[in-house]
Amino acid sequence: MTMGNSWSYVPDDTYKQAIDIVHTLIKIVSRGGNYLLNIGPGPHGDWDPDAYDPLKAVGEWMALNGEGIYATRAVGPYSEGRKYYTRGKDDSATYVFDLSETEKVELPATIRLTAPEGRPVKQIELLGVGKLRFKQTGDSLEISIPENKRSPTHLRYAATFKLVHQ
């Protein structure tokens, strides 16, 4: 996928926003794919200065949430609405990405999701925030998010829940 509108140089090209790049990355990885992001060089072989800001923002998001992306594999149900799943390489954790509709993550008091394959969960962590209380009934999870953790100022684009399996 191109970061701009072309695989090569286009004067005054328009670049994708970081939120769009992160959401596309999550969707692709949740289905077992790889993401190649192209940035066409400028007329002198360097990148357009406008390309750096989205790349920096994606890098910051990856620094916090990368464990749910790197060395993971696809796991059913792949997605439910705006939630996308990956599984850690060693099967000890499942990651659930809850895509934000805006740049800033705003979470509700309760989130419901499916525990893949009905596997028991012993702990749930919101990456970058900490452990959360939850209740599991079969393959259904209900996560309680305290008011002081619903709008963390440093979470952007998507919240990542780490489900640690028993």
Image (cartoon, rainbow, N blue to C red):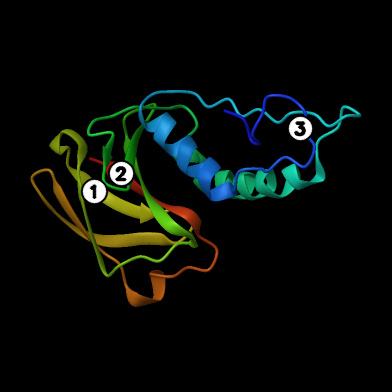
Q: CA distance from mark 1 to mark 2?
A: 6 Å
**Which tag, 1 or 2, sits closer to the chain's start?**
1
Residue 89 located left or right of residue 43: left
User: Percent from the top left, x then y, of residue 121?
Assistant: 22, 45
Q: CA distance from mark 3 to mark 2?
A: 46 Å
Query: What residue would you read off at disc 2?
Result: 164
Query: What residue would you read off at disc 3?
Result: 10
In the figure, residue 120 lies in which quadrant?
top left
Q: Secondary structure at mark 1?
A: strand
**Which tag, 1 or 3, sits closer to the chain's start?**
3
Callouts 1 and 2 close, C-beta under 8 Å: yes
**Which tag, 3 or 2, sits closer to the chain's start?**
3
Query: What residue would you read off at disc 1?
Result: 122
Binning the other alpha carbons within 10 Å of mark 3 as few (below 14), some (14 to 19) or many (20 upward) gives: some
Tell me what residue is drawn at x 69 percent, y 47 percent.
56
Binning the other alpha carbons within 10 Å of mark 2 as few (below 14), some (14 to 19) or many (20 upward) gives: some
Q: Nearer the viewer, residue 147 or 107?
A: 107
User: Percent from the top left, x then y, of residue 27?
Assistant: 40, 35
User: Percent from the top left, x then y, of residue 153?
Assistant: 53, 68
Q: Is residue 71 above or below residue 135?
A: above
Callouts 3 and 2 close, C-beta under 8 Å: no
Q: Secondary structure at mark 2?
A: strand
Q: Nearer the viewer, residue 63 or 2?
A: 2
Residue at the limit of the structure toward the right, as seen here: 44
Tell me what residue is drawn at x 74 percent, y 28 percent.
40
User: Percent from the top left, x then y, of residue 5?
Assistant: 64, 34
Does residue 28 appear anywhere in the picture? yes
Task: Tell me the amino acid under the disc marked 1.
Answer: Lys
